[in-house]
Amino acid sequence: MNLSNLFVNFEEAISMVLFGIGFCNLLMQKNLIKKIIGLNIMDTAMFLFLAAKGYVEGRKAPIITDGVTDVTAYINPIPSGLVLTGIVVSVSVTALMLALTIRLYQRYHTLDIDEITALMKKEEK
């Protein structure tokens, strides 16, 4: 196995590891707050991956200065815009999930998803 590619693309490797940690946390935890943390870790991994893919060594931000209009002198601004948009959406989704978690806790007095499901089934009967 060639480890030189791993060291060249370490940002991508780290983002994959973070995504795996967040995904495992999302699947294996029963506590709703821990599930939200897992989802945020996955979001962060995706932002790191997009930012790493959008950066090119030796290039500058796409602001034309000194009359340089060659495309190869600048990085692509689309991944940065996607990351910023993703962060805004992620914060909004996290706030909504936390608000719903608070409401669930006020109603069922637990954050365990299995207990909440059992209590909901009892209410239906």
Image (spheres, rainbow, N blue to C red):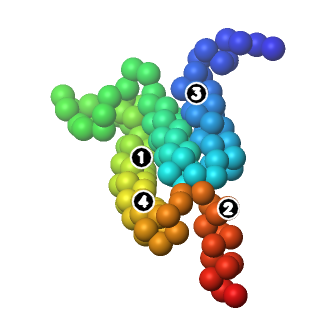
Q: Are marks 3 and 2 in contact (CB under 8 Å)?
A: no
Q: Earlier along the polypeptide chain: callout 2 or callout 4?
A: 4
Up the image or down, 111 lies above or below 4; here it is below
Give the Cα separation between the discs numbered 3 and 2.
32 Å
Question: Which label sits in the foreground, 1 or 2?
Answer: 2
Name the mark on residue 1: none
Give the Cα separation between the discs numbered 4 and 3.
27 Å
Q: Mark 2: which secondary structure?
A: helix
Up the image or down, 106 lies above or below 52; here it is below
Residue type highlighted by circle 4: Leu
Question: Neighbour class for label 4 at 10 Å: few (<14), some, many (≥20)?
Answer: some
Give the Cα separation between the discs numbered 3 and 1.
17 Å
Name the mark on residue 14: 3
Residue type highlighted by circle 2: Asp
Residue type highlighted by circle 3: Ile
Question: Which label sits in the foreground, 1 or 4?
Answer: 4
Name the mark on residue 114: 2
Q: Earlier along the polypeptide chain: callout 3 or callout 1?
A: 3
Q: Which residue is mark 4?
A: 98
**Rendered residue at 54%/47% (across/down):** 34
Position in image of residue 62 (x %, y %): 30, 38
